Each structure stands twice: as C-alpha cells, then as structure tokens.
Image (cartoon, rainbow, N blue to C red):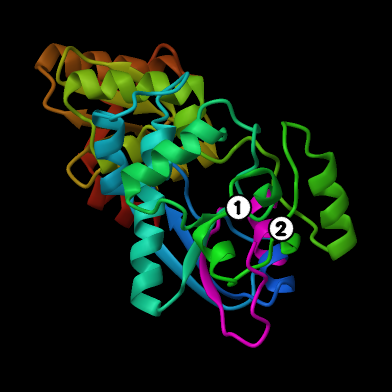
Amino acid sequence: MTERQPNRKVSAVVLFSGGLDSSLACEVLRRAGVELIVLHHHSVFFPLREGRGYVPPGQVIEREISDVMVELVRSPQYGHGRNANPCLDCKQMMYGRAWAEAQRVGAQFIATGEVLGQRPMTQHRDAFRRMEKGAGVEGLVVRPLSGRLLPPTVPEKLGLIGRNDLLDISGRSRRRQMELAAKWGITDYPTPAGGCKLTDPQYAERVFRLRDMGYLAVEPLRAARHGRLFALGDRAFILVGRNDEDNRQLLADAPADARVLELRGHPGPLACLVGEPSAEQLEEAKRLVIRYSRFKDLPLSAVDTCSVAEARQVAR
C-alpha cells in the first residue's frame, strides 16, 4: 500500500449533512491534513439545518436540489425504500455532483460520512460499488469512518491519504461515534432520525397521493409538510393548519397560485386550497375549516377566501 505523501497538498469535497457521521468524517480528514471543501445539499425534503453544532473548517458550498430530488422521487432507477425515499438514486446523484464540484475546485477526491452496515439500503459494499459505478466515480469515494474495512481507494493508492488515517467503524451502533465526538469536542449534533422527510411514513403517503393527483412538484410538496391534507376530488386538495405555528408555516410555504381560507372574525385554522375545485368541493373545503375550529355552528359564509399574496400582506 502506498503511504501518504506528507508534503503534498491534498483536498477533498465532503458530502456534509450536518449530522454526527459527516461531522466526524470531516474531522478525521482534517486531522489527516486534508483541506476540506464541504458540500451541503438541501431540498424541500431535507432543509438546511439551523444552528449546526459542528462547523467544518474550510470552504462551505450549499446547493439547492429540490427539482432534482422531485424527479428522483417520481421515477427512481433503483426504486423507493420503505417509504418514498429513493436512497440509492439520491446518494448516487450526490456522488456525481460532489465529483463535479471537486473537478471545479481542483480537489482530488470526494468523501462521505457513510458507515459500513449502518443502513440496509445504501451502506453495504455492493451498494457502495453500484452507486459509485452509476455516478462514474469508482474508487474516488473515501469513507473515513469505515475506510480500513473497505477496499483501498484511488486516493489511498496515490498516497493522498494513508490507510492508518481512516477508521474501522461498522454496524448500527453509534457508540464509537459518540465517544469520538466527546473526545474531539463535537457537541449538539442531531439525532439520526429527522433528516429526510421522505423516510417519514405519514409524509411519504402524502407524496404518493400528490403524485397520483398530478401535483408532484416542489411547491405543493413544500406546503404538504404542514397541516392536515384532504383530497377534493382528483385534481384539488386542501391543507388545514393544526395550530398557530402550523398556520404560519402553511402560509409561508403555500404555492403562489393557491387560495387561502380563514374564518372571518374568529380564531381558527388557516387552510391552503390547491387546484381548481368545483363549487361543491369549495363548500366542502369551507366545511373543513369550520370543522377544525371551535365554532362548529358557523355558516359557510363565515369562511373568507383570498389569494396567498393577499393573506401574506394581511399577516405582516
């Protein structure tokens, strides 16, 4: 095995989610003398994390990929996971984008926080090989947390990073990661769950319902993260807020061409109506607003309808 060349400048693009594993991967590479270019993808399904506990050194690149993710959800090459998550396609796409960034900035390889055996769909040897081949980056992905357990990569063979710089973590337990985090002063990291919304069974059900209705697009999918969803026939749906915070989020994320329904002069849910409902379906939407308020006996005329722009103006 070629040893690392100590005086050679080495840089890598690291796929960074803000979670514990990607934070540790950055730290392993930093301690090995690798210059980091951190690539953080975000989308309607996995927004940017606020207040990340670990701030990686070096350049940080943020890329919004909602449109790309929607197309992967629509027709994944490798299929969906347990819910609406096209994990293999997603990671393969990210490999390719990370390598494109590496070529743009002159980095020699890419790296991830993947741990061998941690996730059944994407983090095993066959999946690693398949995704690398599909992205055209065979041998160019370094996995600092499990590198000693995996075949030598091109960067190792070229002496860009040493085998002994890498770790030998495997399996689903996070004990070793948590011990390393404590040792290296990495705190306030998020739990493993709560990253991608597509793994949430309830949200995944909404994704498939919107797909079947012809609304698999960024704006409807963003709004569908909030409220209660009700289909109004085959071509319209309504989202009804559950509480004040839900109302605010729903108004903020409502598609620009949606309509907003609210009770006149009474506190209650805000609703976002998407599509072109019939007169009967519009009445049903108004009944839902009243149903989820404290004022069950109000007439339908008590529900006001306006554009999203008008509702946002009033809310200011």
- Give the image location of residue 283, x and y in percent: 21, 15
Q: Residue 143 carries which label?
A: 1
Asked whether, in this view, residue 267 is left or right of residue 165, the answer is left
Secondary element at image label 2: loop
For label 2, the crowd category at 10 Å Cα-Cα, with few meaning under 14, some 14 to 19 and many 20 or more, is: many
Task: Specify whether residue 23 is painted magenta.
Answer: yes
Q: Which mark is residue 166?
A: 2
Residue shown at the point (44%, 23%) measured from the top left: 81
User: Is 287 or 182 nearer to us in this picture?
Assistant: 182
Range shown magenta: 1-27
- Give the image location of residue 284, x and y in percent: 25, 13
How many numbered marks have been drawn onto this rendered protein structure?
Answer: 2
Q: Residue 66 carries which label?
A: none
Secondary element at image label 1: loop
Q: Do the residues labelled 2 and 1 touch (CB within 8 Å)?
A: yes
Mark 2 or 1, nearer chain start:
1
